[in-house]
Image: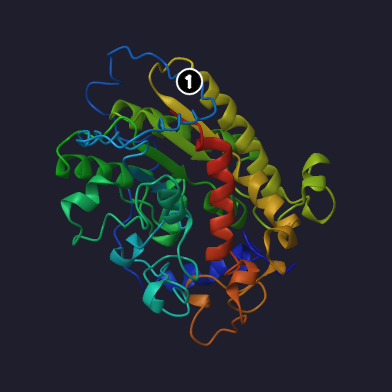
Amino acid sequence: MKMAFTTMPSVISVVLIALAGAVTAAPPPAAGGPPPVAGGPPKVPVTPPVPAGPPTVPTPPPTGPPMVSSPPPAVAAPLKFPALLAFGDSVADTGNNNYVRTIVRANFPPYGKGFPGHKATGRFSDGKVSVDFLASALGVKELLPPYLNKGLSLEELKTGVSFASAGSGYDNATCRTMSALTMERQLELFQEYKAKVGGTIPDKALYIMVWGSNDIVEHFNFADGLTAAQYSDIMVRRAISYIQSLASLGAKRIALTGAPPVGCVPSQRMIAGGIRKQCATDRNQLAILFNRKVKEEMAKIGANMPGVTLVYIDLYGVLADVVERHDQFGFKNGKDACCGYIGLAAAVLCNFASPLCPDPSKYVFWDSYHPTEAAYKVLIDIIVEKYFKFMH
């Protein structure tokens, strides 16, 4: 099988680890929950959000002669989503790893081939990535900048940034392998960010968490002695703890994406059948197990968090559907990577010397781990329509 999310992990992970030996980054904090936040969750009661409904159709203006004097300009309504704040791994990293001592970077060609100016910005794709399209679809801005870019203006900061780091995961051992920013470090950077923007963030800002796939790969590549059930429980505890930490810092809208398929991408028929045939991998079974558990736990804690909206995004199902029906979404290839050799193409292994497909927009996968810009656009359009269109 020659495709993504990951055909590469068992080989690429080992190669990256060997290369990472030359990087002398300080080890991240030991595994455990995100750092405690003084004061705990906010105590002010807030009425839970009203269930969403279809948008109201505006009444057409009355006909008749024009008025002599113009009415005063209408007061602009506040943005439905005034800011987007992203945490996670390479799916949401818009360039933070450019400023981290790691080899897990994408700031060289052919990454960025389709980005404005053909610039390799550190995004793991041929152009824009998931959170760029999410920010655009939600009416926030066209690109979500990396927080570690110290040249950002205050106005740019106020509408949101990404704290994500390629190679990161719920498990700090995953982060140590790739010298990526841990969950704790990303939370510390968020607290620093809050101070920079004045300490308060609009209640309608959206916080999104994108982790999980790197943990699953590392769990199987470096046998840790834990069963799938035990490891999934650790991932879930870390995810729920992070949600609670964000809520205690004022977050009111928190979305979490489930882990995507890892290994071959199963079809919907395979999903319905319990991931049988060639996609009956241990990795996908762990992804499914984690996704089910974290969704259940989010529902439980959400019932006890008035004023906080939690959204679980089924990235596994959305991606599997796009891959299976790729031709219906305008793609010619749903399994092969556009950049690199079969099964060997991500980060330093997708480079200027790698084979490259003639038209990335016809491929679902850019390298053996990440979607193309065109595929990211399709995925986010589906996610926004399903999860955010009617959010109040």
Q: Residue furthest front?
A: 65
Q: Quadrant of residue 315?
A: top right
Q: Quadrant of residue 105?
A: bottom left
The answer to whether residue 16 shows anywhere in this view is yes
Q: Nearer the viewer, residue 237 or 335?
A: 335
Which residue is disc 1 drawn over? Answer: 301
Q: Nearer the viewer, residue 195 or 211?
A: 195
x, y (%) of residue 145?
31, 57
Q: In percent of the image, x 47 and y 52: which residue is there?
A: 174
Q: Does residue 330 appear left or right of residue 369 in this picture?
A: right
x, y (%) of residue 333?
71, 69
**Position of the N terminus by quadrant:** bottom right
The answer to whether residue 224 shows anywhere in this view is no
Q: Quadrant of residue 206?
A: top left
x, y (%) of residue 258?
57, 41
Q: In percent of the image, x 63 and y 79: which residue is there?
A: 341
Q: In percent of the image, x 60 and y 84: which residue is there?
A: 355
Secondary structure found at label 1: helix
Mark 1: amino acid: Ile
Above or below — where is 128 with respect to 37? below
Q: Nearer the viewer, residue 160 or 236?
A: 160
Tag 1: Cα neighbours inside 10 Å, few (<14), some, or many (≥20)? some
Q: Residue furthest bottom?
A: 353
